[in-house]
Image (tube, rainbow, N blue to C red):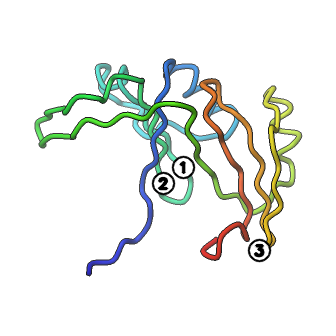
């Protein structure tokens, strides 16, 4: 069987792309992946560069439910509903409490895992659960 190397993308579905992009830029220092994005595409989604060769895709709710045909092929429809979850790996949580507070972001939960890792949880403007996780939360991390 061919091997999988890593998870490349994760997606969140939001009502307000501008507000969520600004949140992820300001709070997590993520940068837009494509600053020359086609204006029509920018109304549907915003790709955000996650250090470590990953991408956070912010899709406008309802903008991706139908199959999309492009010059290079097709992308089947997809959608997510409800408050979704994503986790970002950090080496340490040092300084994060102060940074989140300065950004007006409240830590909603904290978990200390048996493997030695710690997770802090907070919400983005759409109510999605965002996690900062240190090594030791999974056998693979």
Mark 1 vs mark 3, foreground winner is 3
3D distance between C-alphas at marks 3 and 2: 24 Å
Judged from the image, the secondary structure of the residue bearing numbered disc 1 is: strand
Judged from the image, the secondary structure of the residue bearing numbered disc 3 is: loop
48 over 54 or under it: above or below = above
Quadrant holding the C terminus: bottom right
User: Could you say which is closer to the camera, residue 114 or residue 49?
Assistant: 114
Q: Looking at the picture, how far across and down is residue 131, in whole percent?
A: 68, 47
User: Could you say which is closer to the camera, residue 134 or residue 112?
Assistant: 112
Q: Is residue 43 left or right of residue 110?
A: left
User: Could you say which is closer to the camera, residue 48 or residue 9?
Assistant: 9
Task: Read off the residue under disc 1.
Answer: 50
Task: Read off the residue under disc 2.
Answer: 54
Residue pictured at 71% horizontal, 66% vertical: 137
16 over 129 or under it: above or below = above
Residue pictured at 71% horizontal, 51% vertical: 132
Q: Is residue 66 left or right of residue 133?
A: left
Task: Read off the residue under disc 3.
Answer: 115
Mark 3 vs mark 2, foreground winner is 3
Quadrant holding the N terminus: bottom left
């Amino acid at each position: 069987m061919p091997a999988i190397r890593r998870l490349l993308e994760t997606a969140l579905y939001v009502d307000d792309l501008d507000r969520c992009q600004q949140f992820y830029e300001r709070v997590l220092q993520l940068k837009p992946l494509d600053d020359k994005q086609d204006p029509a595409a920018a109304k549907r989604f915003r790709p955000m560069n996650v250090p470590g060769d990953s991408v956070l895709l912010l899709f406008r709710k309802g903008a991706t439910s139908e199959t999309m045909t492009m010059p290079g092929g097709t992308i089947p429809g997809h959608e997510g509903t409800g408050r979704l979850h994503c986790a970002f790996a950090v080496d340490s949580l040092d300084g994060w409490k102060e940074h989140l507070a300065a950004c007006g972001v409240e830590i909603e939960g904290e978990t200390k895992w048996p493997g030695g890792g710690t997770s802090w949880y907070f919400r983005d403007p759409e109510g999605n659960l965002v996690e900062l996780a240190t090594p030791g939360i999974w056998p693979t991390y």
